[in-house]
Amino acid sequence: MSKLPTLFLAFASLAAGYSGAQSLPTPPTQYPSGQLGDLVKLGEDIVMNTDKNPLTKDLVGNKLTCASCHIDGGKQPTIGTFIGSATVYPAYSSREDAVLTLQDRNDNCFMRSMNGTRPLVDGKASIAMAAYVSWLSEGIPMRMDPVKPVTPFFSEKWPDKAVRPLVKKSSHADYVQGEALYKDQCAACHGDDGLGSDAAPPLWGEGSYNSGAGMAVPGQLATWVEQNMPPGNAGLKPSQAVDVSLYIDAQPRPAFDLKAHLLPASEMGVYNAKVLDEKDSVRSVYKSIGLDVDAIRGDKAIP
């Protein structure tokens, strides 16, 4: 049998290790030259300063940026990384019941995680963000995903299967434990009231992600928390991540009405989705995963 080319062997080894962060390559540091390099740098600035960049600041409806969830601009080798993300697109998304492009996926976050307005299709901001994410995926084999739009390095871990049964059997006692854990591990940065600080973004309230965001689902938030919090010292057990996520996501936050976050097609362009009418609230999100948020909280405070 003839020897495979060295590059192919390297890619094969990389693909075989897609299930964990230890396999992630080091992100590039050398920007492309010319206009492409300028566009990549612009995309990076938008990711880091979404609420301040002139192209996107008016599209953000809260106090979050892309980097609030994608730590270090998506360069950190944990869940939320952009490394490898571009290689899965076009990819199917059950939320939209459609095959999405990378630009679709980036643009949709403005409506949900940033409680704002979807950018113009193929506008400069949209293309710049896609260029930046693509740059972070250079050298990684393409592997389109027919199931979900998640970087191949964490496709098996998003959401973490270990947290699903824990979420389903959650109770008010778990919520109480989550509140205590929040006060001990999170409040120093995010505030006792969850409204954030100069050091960390808000986790609930009008300045946080709305109920249509992936982070508004306790199992997804718990998966992210497991690998990213506390910063630089992530080490919560799955049960702890579930408890604190159960507490955080049960707090008041903006409801989500898809139609309210879309510009008219004549201004925005085509919204690539088959699901065109979606409304979410804290209560409906918990109901969708088989939980009663009133019973979880022990009161009737959430609309």
Image: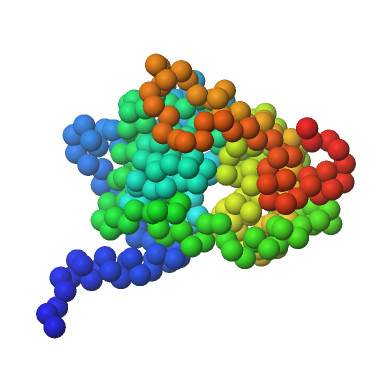
Residue 122: where, in percent of width, then height?
33, 28
> Is residue 220 toward the left or the right of residue 108 in the image?
right
Q: Is residue 221 above or below residue 195?
A: below
Q: Is residue 244 above or below residue 48?
A: below
Q: Is residue 177 visible?
A: no
Residue 242: where, in percent of width, then height?
69, 57
> Is residue 34 toward the left or the right of residue 180 in the image?
left
Which quadrant of the figure has residue 243?
A: bottom right
Quarter of the rendering occupied by the N terminus: bottom left
Which quadrant of the figure has residue 112?
A: top right
Name which residue lies at 47% across and 36% down.
274
Name which residue lies at 34% across and 25% down.
123
Q: Is residue 252 visible?
A: yes
**Coloring scheme of the render?**
rainbow
Residue 289: where, in percent of width, then height?
68, 51
In this view of the protein, which residue sits in the foreground, 235 or 90? Answer: 90
Considering every residue shown, the one lying at the far left of the view is: 2
Residue 65: where, in percent of width, then height?
51, 35
Quarter of the rendering occupied by the C terminus: top right
